[in-house]
Amino acid sequence: MIEVSPTRMELLKLKRRTSVAKRGHKLLKDKQNELIRRLLDMIKTVKELRERVDREIAEASGRFAFARASMDPEEVEEAFLIPTKKISTEISVKRLMSVSIPSFKEQISGEMIPYSFATTSAELDVALSALEKAISSLMELAEKEKGLQLLADEIGKTRRRVNALEYVLIPELEETVKYISMKLSEMERGDLMRLMRIKEIVRAH
């Protein structure tokens, strides 16, 4: 129970607190259920993205291995001496159910192919194109996985709040309200008994 004086004022305050706590519990429970629904949707999206990224990276690696097999090692090394493409990430934030989710946007400049076509295999061009495609998918996967992590963290926090209200605060408030109500009833009965005794004494005289 919460330690308070058993007065009508405290009883009214505790009843209001109990009502607010129950409304807050319902809102948090609804939020938790919606967060879980969003999380499950995101898990499905991330799973599909991972499978796509795995396929695209495997394809790029296979193409590159095939290109290296058809070229001299010196030619491969020379082809990549001077990179001509730069990729950076612009990060912004979007809100999802009061959770700040990062949004990644790739900033690309330059060309993916830094070499002359005269001394390289056509398979190397295909390998770089496949790698470029995989980078875009990888960026999208990173964004979704970070969002998934943050959403899971928020669900954990919300669940702890729901449990604290449901199993600690609300039972304590209800028990205290019950205790004060009983105390006030006892006090009223005691006052009534005293009044009746006073009336009997007055009548006797």
Image: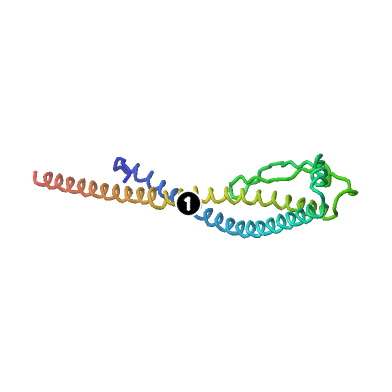
| Amino acid under disc 1 | Arg
Residue visible at 52% across and 51% down?
A: 155
Q: In terms of secondary structure, where does tag 1 sit?
A: helix
Say which residue label 1 marks: 159
Query: Along the horizontal axis of the image, is 93 left or right of 132?
Result: left
Which residue lies most toward the right here?
118
User: What colouring does the structure picture have?
Assistant: rainbow
x, y percentage for residue 19?
43, 50
Pick the front one: 180 or 101? 101
Query: Along the horizontal axis of the image, is 192 left or right of 139?
Result: left
Pick the front one: 89 or 7? 89
x, y percentage for residue 10?
34, 42
Residue visible at 21% across and 49% down?
A: 189
The 10 Å Cα crowd at callout 1, few under 14, some 14 to 19, many 20 or more, is some
Residue visible at 66% across and 43% down?
A: 93
Task: Name the image quarter holding the C terminus.
Answer: top left
Residue visible at 38% across and 49% down?
A: 168
Query: Along the horizontal axis of the image, is 172 left or right of 40?
Result: left
Q: How many marks?
A: 1
x, y percentage for residue 2?
33, 43
x, y percentage for residue 198?
15, 44
Pick the front one: 150 or 46? 46
